[in-house]
């Protein structure tokens, strides 16, 4: 082996070593340039007029006074979108700019392009929206009523999912102990420190944008569809990105910046305010869970039943993925031969819920892990040992019927964690 090949091989050995992330040092010393830090020559500032009500019918958007303000270069509405006025991770139901119906506080109504931030803010104040406020739905219970106002179409139900395995009722009849509980897991915001931001240009028929994002390829497709141009005419570049945790997977500033650059033919920059970021960014899904779990006298899990109600907010985002994963993982990492799960996800006029580390699994973990603790307590078994008695191992069959044939690490993890805890306590 040549010296060069040997050196290259050695430098690529990272397992078992402490390896610095490529960008960590520049971030620590403040050298990294985030999207909000970037500047281009002749750059304009972009801002968005947003709704202050959660549900309304829009009759007209009056932009004339804002257009006349000195320093304003353009004021854009849905009429200025040349392509599809709809974005979304799975379903394209969130308007880039509202045309007729407001579905949440913070919906985007118009884009202002001006010479500086102060002019943008004044122009936004001058935009008048003629709307009729309409009744909204803000709880899952209200959303499920037959006579409830509908956020989209003729039903507030985004999706239902079911999982059935074995004979649940017969299995519960054989249980020595049964635990039943209800849980509420509230909506949670990612609250990342870096606000969403994008810089965009339009030159020689090519849109280029640098953004704070976790999803640059998706962003490119959404911008291309909005502008009705091929993806080969869109360059999506991920700037150094701060916290995301799933909250920067959805479109935020990209379409508004690209639309502005497309029309004014100059570099533009948009940065969400902290208020905008907290209002508009996707959240972790609120869930109401009902669990019933049973075990025999020896501590072997026999049956589990769960019912889940979920709020995706005003738009679907990753909702279809979240409800599916919640159902699949409802029983946790435990082998239970008899399972019945029913889940319903609804639209409301609340903030949009989407991806947040775990895609629905952290919520159901609140349920199944509490059930494990209480079953163990009733049976007089140590809660860690109870989990080790029931957790997946090679050869286990999951609730969806999958046989686990490869490495399954939970038993070993629990075992080593228990040993380490005993060392610390001794």
Image (cartoon, helix red, strand yellow):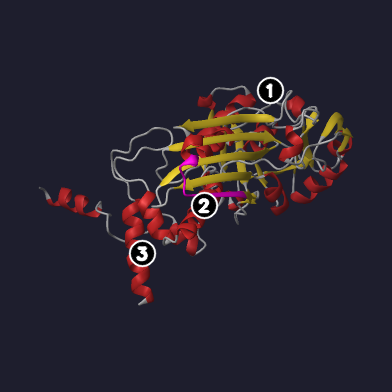
Asked whether residue 403 is in view, the answer is yes
Residue 141 percent coordinates (x, y): 74, 38
Report whether 323 appears left or right of 301. right
Q: CA distance from mark 3 to mark 1?
A: 61 Å
234 or 22, which lies in front?
22
Residue drawn at x 38%, y 49% as measured from the top left: 390
Marks 3, 2: nearer the viewer:
2
> Which label's residue is closer to the chain start, 3 or 2?
2
Residue 250 percent coordinates (x, y): 59, 39
In magenta, the rendered stretch is: 172-182
The residue that mark 2 highlights is 371
- Specify whether residue 380 is painted magenta: no
- Give the numbered dot on residue 418: 3
> Which label's residue is closer to the chain start, 3 or 1?
1
Q: CA distance from mark 1 to mark 2?
A: 53 Å
Q: Quadrant of the C terminus?
A: bottom left
277 or 135, which lies in front?
135
**Dot 2 crowding, Cα within 10 Å, few <14, some 14–19, many 20+:** many
Q: Secondary structure at mark 2?
A: helix
The residue that mark 1 highlights is 82
């Amino acid at each position: 082996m040549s010296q060069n090949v040997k050196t290259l091989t050695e430098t690529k050995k990272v397992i078992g070593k402490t390896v610095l992330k490529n960008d960590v040092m520049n971030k620590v010393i403040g050298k990294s340039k985030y999207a909000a830090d970037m500047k281009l020559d002749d750059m304009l500032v972009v801002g968005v007029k947003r709704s202050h009500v959660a549900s309304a019918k829009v009759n007209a958007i009056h932009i004339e006074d804002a257009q006349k303000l000195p320093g304003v270069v353009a004021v854009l509405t849905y009429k200025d979108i040349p392509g599809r006025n709809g974005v979304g991770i799975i379903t394209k139901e969130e308007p880039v700019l509202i045309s007729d119906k407001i579905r949440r506080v913070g919906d985007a109504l118009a884009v202002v392009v001006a010479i500086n931030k102060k002019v943008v803010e004044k122009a936004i104040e001058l935009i008048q929206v003629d709307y009729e406020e309409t009744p909204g739905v803000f709880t899952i219970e209200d959303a499920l009523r037959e006579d409830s106002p509908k956020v989209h179409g003729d039903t507030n139900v985004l999706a239902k999912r079911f999982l059935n395995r074995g004979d649940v009722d017969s299995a519960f009849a054989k249980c020595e102990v049964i635990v039943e509980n209800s849980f509420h897991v509230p909506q949670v915001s990612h609250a990342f420190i870096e606000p969403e931001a994008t810089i965009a240009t339009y030159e020689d028929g090519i849109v280029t944008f640098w953004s704070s994002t976790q999803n640059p390829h998706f962003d490119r497709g959404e911008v291309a569809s909005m502008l009705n141009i091929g993806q080969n005419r869109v360059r999506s570049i991920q700037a150094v990105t701060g916290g995301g945790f799933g909250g920067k997977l959805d479109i935020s500033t990209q379409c508004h910046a690209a639309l502005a650059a497309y029309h004014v033919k100059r570099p533009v920059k948009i940065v969400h305010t902290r208020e905008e970021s907290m209002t508009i960014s996707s959240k972790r899904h609120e869930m109401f869970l009902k669990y019933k779990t049973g075990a025999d006298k020896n501590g072997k899990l026999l049956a589990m039943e769960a019912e889940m109600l979920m709020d995706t907010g005003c738009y679907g985002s990753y909702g279809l993925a979240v409800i599916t994963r919640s159902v699949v993982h409802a029983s946790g990492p435990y082998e239970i031969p008899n399972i019945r799960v029913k889940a319903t996800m609804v639209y409301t006029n609340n903030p949009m819920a989407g991806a947040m580390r775990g895609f629905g699994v952290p919520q159901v973990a609140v349920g199944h892990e509490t059930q494990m603790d209480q079953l163990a307590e009733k049976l007089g078994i140590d809660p860690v040992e109870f989990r080790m008695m029931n957790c997946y191992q090679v050869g286990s069959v999951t609730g969806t019927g999958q046989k686990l044939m490869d490495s399954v690490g939970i038993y070993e993890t629990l075992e080593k964690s228990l040993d380490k805890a005993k060392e610390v306590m001794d």
